[in-house]
Image (cartoon, rainbow, N blue to C red):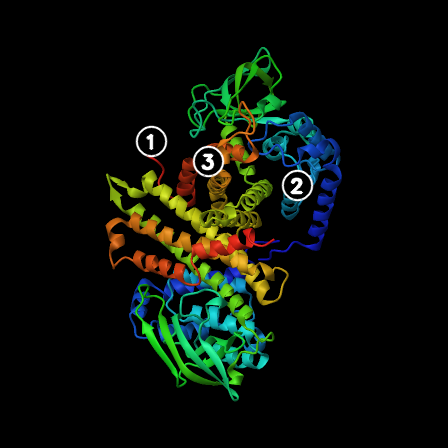
Amino acid sequence: MDFAFTDEQQMIRDTAEAFLKDTSTSEAVRTAMVSELGYDAELWQRLCGEMYWQAIHIPEAYGGLGLSYIELIAIVEQMGRYLLCAPYFSTVCLATNALLCAGSEEQKAEYLGAICEGKTATLAWSNTGGWTAASVSASARKDGDDYLLSGDYRYVIDGASAELLILAAKEAGSDAVQLFAVDAAAAGIERQALPTMDQTRRQAAIQLKDLRVPAGAKLACESGDAADALNKTLQLATVALAAEQAGGMQQLLSSAVEYTQERKQFNRPIASFQSIKHKAADMMMRNEVARSSIYYAACVADEALNGGELSAELPEAASIAKAWCSEAYFKNAGEAMQMHGGVGFTWEYDVHLYFKRAKASEHLLGNSDQHRENIAALLLDGE
Amino acid sequence: MKLQFSEKDEAFRKEIAGWLADNLTGEFAQLKFRGGPGDEHMFPEERKRWEQKLAEGGWTCVGWPTEYGGRGLSIEQQVIFYEEYARAGAPGRMGHIGDGLTGPTLIAFGSEAQKAKYLPGILAGTEFWCQGYSEPGAGSDLANVKTKARFDEAKGKWVITGQKVWTSLAHESEYCFVIARTDPDSKAHKGLGFFLVKMDQPGVTVRPIEQITGTSEFNEVFFDDAECDADDIVGEPGDGWKVAMGLLGFERGVSTLGQQMAFQNELNEVVKLARENGAANDPQIRQRIAQAHIGLKIMRYNSMRMLSGDKGDGSLQKEALIYKLYWASWHRDLGELAVDIMGPEATILPEAPYELNRLQSLFLFTRSDTIYGGTNQIQRNIIAERGLGMPKEPKW
């Protein structure tokens, strides 16, 4: 048992922190978040070409780096800290995980290979913001050698810009969930970018009207029902989202402490008042505890991807991390805003970017109440 | 990062689990799950005999180096020891102050003579210790100690006068370590000494404090010209604060994981009751039970991080700083949840005049968690000042 980063993991984390501090500055975030694409395409090219982060946990056989989910989490935590605007979460944490969980060897070689080369992708599964395979509502109907897909998706992360879509649909007749890998430019896909309160992460609505896809686009999924694979994908993504949240908390704490040490009232830095110090102390406690929850979940997620003995713990570990981090991030964002006083309410200061991101992240992939109920069901229901 | 224990460590787990299963029987069977927080006053004699049983098996002082008679266990194996100890329901350790605090302090700061004199009794489970820190005027302001120690040249002994308070199990202890002022003109953390004082002597009086539970595990201890030998001071006069702070560091060691297993036993009882009485169907109770479960799981992850050490970014110290605030608040919330699950039945006692059941006792006793060992408010000051570098309070 060694619950600390290895030297190599620490180096990857430190490199990510340094790179993002330089490139995902406040100015860069503010430029990207109002751009048409929603991110800086040049920076995305650097992430893929120089850092190779899009390939971090893709096995070497498909052209990736073959590192563990722990390295991925270490990087994502820093992305959350610096509010990176990039299609990373959608491409790597959603679509790549879906392909890893459900794709055949040939499909993984093709699609993961393309992702390694910088192709963007996302996963669309629900119209209601549900966070399990039970929320899939689109339908897939067999038509000769093809499938015809119909239905609506909402809250699709980076759905308007992604180049490859992984679409979840229920198969007519059996109600089995299937995942289809489809070129986003295919005829029959209507995509509408939705204006978002949190401008640092884009969402879209997608409408399918008898979208014709070849049977080969259906992700293989040995069992014939991809519901488990989709659930696992969403749990893996949930762990990554919690890591982003923990990173955001870290930045809020740093900026709130820094601001209160500069700001003077009654001839003292307001950081010297216990009412402020105690808020900061609680923020740090929630933050450190959040980090513990994501590192544990990262270890479990890695085992789940590789069939390790802790695989079965993934639903619980993901729910623990998301339940804690969602509430803690939003709480810390609110406290940071309060500690900034009036300026915290201005567009100029960055606190509101984190505050909005915190609330948006809370509602993505299940909020704290939902994940607590998930835990409650594990503890209290059944035998 | 890796969560699994090695094969060797898992074999060790079997060894300790097997020993406990074989020995927590007969006269000791009644001690299962007893003697924890809020229950520390129960079965003292039997629990002392249990300490001696542990000693026979070599299971006291497992973290001490072998040269001092300990087992020299690695961090991982200590973690396993405390986990299995609590999992088996083995009783609250009468010897934990000696084992966890006095011993490590003497090993770090004591003379060879002090080690030879005091360590064997702790190892054998025959000599028990209590902690003389707080005073009526020195609670959160711990350095405001008024108890005095003066060296009596004629007797060749230290003579101690003053009062300590909140001393756990003082009435069951052979020795007390006492911080007292060696320089009468000194203030705050300067001019203190750290003394090893025998309890059974005319100058020491123990008076139990009746707590909100109706029971007494805390005491007042009065020193009226109590004596200890010239070499019963750890370090030099004036080193007392340094030694005392070193000792507080030992309090945040691996035994936190044993504490968490005891918490798990309590939570299991709460969950069981909720399933039995139907509270488990109430959506709000479900949320609170889940939150308690989440909080305890993360407490464990947090300790694992703390114990695995940091890689130079200072996170180890930071994690350690938050630990007390975190567990104390969690435990208090568990106490509230327990009685809320009991519902109106929580208001009825098993017996007059004031006998509490386990969960009622948990509810009341956990109010002390956020007060002793540094209140939540003091913890927040420490986190803000040492963890975040925020300014100290202006002096009055």
- Residue occupying the point 74% across, 36% down: B25
Instruction: Evaluate whether label 3 is on the same chain as label 2.
Output: yes
Q: Position of residue A16 (x, y in %)?
A: 45, 64
The chain to which mark 2 is attached is B
Image coordinates of residue A73 in percent, x first then y, are: 49, 62
How many residues crowd mark 3 within 10 Å: few (<14), some (14–19), many (20+)? many
Q: Measured along the vertical axis of the image, is residue B217 above or below residue A131? A: above
Q: Nearer the viewer, residue A173 or B12?
A: A173
Q: Quadrant of residue A85?
A: bottom left
Residue B395 is marked as 1
Q: Which residue is mark 3?
A: B370
Looking at the rendering, in which quadrant would you find the N terminus of chain B? Answer: bottom right
> Tag 3: residue type?
Thr
Could you give the CA–CA distance between mark 2 and mark 1, rounded to whole angstroms? 46 Å
- Viewer-proximal residue, A350 or B104? A350
Question: How far is disc 3 from disc 1 in space, using C-alphas?
Answer: 25 Å
Q: Secondary structure at mark 2?
A: helix
Q: Foreground mark, 2 or 1?
A: 2
Disc 1 residue type (three-letter): Lys
The residue singled out by tag 2 in the image is: B85
Mark with earlier residue (3, 1) = 3
- The residue carrying pointer 2 sits among few (fewer than 14), some (14 to 19) or many (20 or more) residues within 10 Å by Cα, namely some
Q: How many marks?
A: 3
Same chain for labels 3 and 1? Say yes or no.
yes
Q: Earlier in the sequence, mark 3 or mark 2?
A: 2
Is residue A332 found left or right of B53 in the rendered image?
Answer: left
- Marks 3 and 2, Cα distance to the nearest angstrom? 25 Å
